[in-house]
Amino acid sequence: VQLQASGGGLVQAGGSLKLSCSASGRTFSSGAVGWFRQVPGKEREFVGSITWRFGSTYYTDSVKGRFTISRDNAVKTVYLQMNSLKPEDTAVYYCAATVVAGTKWDYWGQGTLVTVSS
């Protein structure tokens, strides 16, 4: 599985941005795609995830109500819609995939930088 994250950029606080994670190669119907983010000098943080089969979503508390993850199975793409962005959301965002939902993240894409200005 190869993952390609895109859509990062510069946005003002309160604005919105939509990231995409495109998967190529084999995907796993029992698996999931997750979004993570990392600020230099800090540990990578789980943002949220979605399962391919049922579209079940999970979010870390700090983004609940502001971020929404969706997927389009036909084009093997997962989206991260980010609204009401805050400067503390600034980070490099990564997507990852797991063969079976709930297990370790097996595949990682390159990051895309999101910068939120105050």
Image (tube, grey):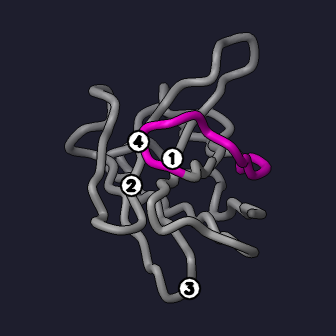
Q: Secondary structure at mark 1?
A: strand
Q: How many marks?
A: 4
Gap in angstroms between the C-alphas marked 3 and 4: 20 Å
Which of the two discs, 4 and 2, sits closer to the camera?
2
Which span is picked out in magenta?
100-112
Residue that badge 1 annotates: 34
> What amino acid type should be assigned to the residue bearing mark 4?
Gly
C-beta proximity under 8 Å, tags 4 and 2: yes
> What amino acid type should be assigned to the residue bearing mark 2?
Ile
> What amino acid type should be assigned to the residue bearing mark 1?
Gly
Gap in angstroms between the C-alphas marked 3 and 1: 17 Å
Dividing the picture into quarters, in which one does residue 59 lie? Answer: top left
C-beta proximity under 8 Å, tags 1 and 4: yes
Dividing the picture into quarters, in which one does residue 90 lie? Answer: top right
Residue that badge 3 annotates: 75
Q: Is residue 94 magenta?
A: no
C-beta proximity under 8 Å, tags 2 and 1: yes
In this orientation, which residue lies closer to the viewer: 97 or 78?
97
x 37%, y 58%: residue:
69
Residue 34 picture location, percent across and down: 51, 47
x 56%, y 77%: residue:
76
Mark positioned earlier in the residue sequence (3 or 1): 1
Mark positioned earlier in the residue sequence (2 or 1): 1
Residue that badge 4 annotates: 48
